[in-house]
Image (cartoon, rainbow, N blue to C red):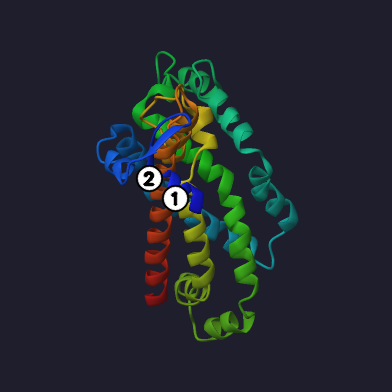
Amino acid sequence: MVQALFLSFRSGLGNNLKFSGFRNYARLFEDLTFHSSVANVFIYLLFQVPIMLFSALILASILNQPDLKGKTVFRTLIFLPCATALVSSALIFKSFFSMDGIINFTLQNLHIISEPKNWLLDPIWSKVIIIIIITWRWTGYNTIFYMAGLQNIDTSVYEAARIDGASASQQFFKITLPLLRPVILLTTIMSTNGTLQLFDEVRTISPGTGFKSTITISQHIYNVSFTNVPQLGYAAALSYTILIMVAFLSFIQMKVGDKV
């Protein structure tokens, strides 16, 4: 990390690097691709993380019901996407949404669309597809955390609430959510960090390295480092930008979590 920090203050192409002060960091304000990547990442963050964590919480609550039959099978099915390789899961969804994929085939047969749509080249739908992939891939992973948290809650608390006449929704909002707060905070921080460093899914889905509608900060760093002539100093500055974002957002989430 120290070496990368020193590298971020050097500019040049390939191995021909010279000390340039804060020039790489100043370049961030003029780099339109960097601006697009930051905007895309925050769109993924604002939509995907809440949907995924809320879905995981609901699934964990259902799977934690003591009278649920086939609990082991449901737990395995929900966790199964997490065991799939990132690139493999992205390729599966890429085939679904391709011009001759099952989505176009189904929608045409239902007469919802008249001709195949190129979903992956659409600026909005390409983002939606990436959000679907990430949500499908990581919901089961977060469900496991919530289930572990739910199993640590003393059942006598719920029994006392039921005796006092509390409904299921009141038990969920008044007991489950407050007692799960540390786990919710943990999963929120981990999910935020993971989304800020998103790479594999977007790299696989994107039709090209310069496709700005879906590009992320990590993908931009990869392009700067390994596409055309390497600009390692600028790539290091971009990497430290992610580090600052992750630290700043984690700090805010921890402060908010302490006050709730």
Q: Residue at x 48, y 66 (%)?
A: 185
The residue positioned farthest toward the top in the image shown: 115
Marks 2 and 1 sit apart, C-alpha to C-alpha, by 7 Å
The residue under label 2 is which amino acid type?
Phe
Q: Tag 1's secondary structure?
A: helix
| Closer to us: 246 or 54 | 246
Q: Is residue 4 left or right of residue 123?
A: right
Where disc 2 sits, the SS reads: loop
| Between 151 and 65, the one nearer to me in the picture | 151
10 Å crowding of disc 2: few (<14), some (14-19), many (20+): many
Q: Residues within 10 Å of mark 1 (few under 14, many from 20)?
A: some
Label number found at residue 25: none
Q: Give the residue at mark 1.
A: 5
Circles 2 and 1 in contact, beta carbons < 8 Å? yes
Image coords of residue 46 (percent x, y): 37, 50
Residue with the most extreme left position: 30
Residue in front for this viewpoint, 57 or 229? 229
- Relative to 170, does residue 24 appear above or below in the rendering? above
| Disc 2: which residue | 9
Image spot of residue 111 (x, y percent): 43, 19
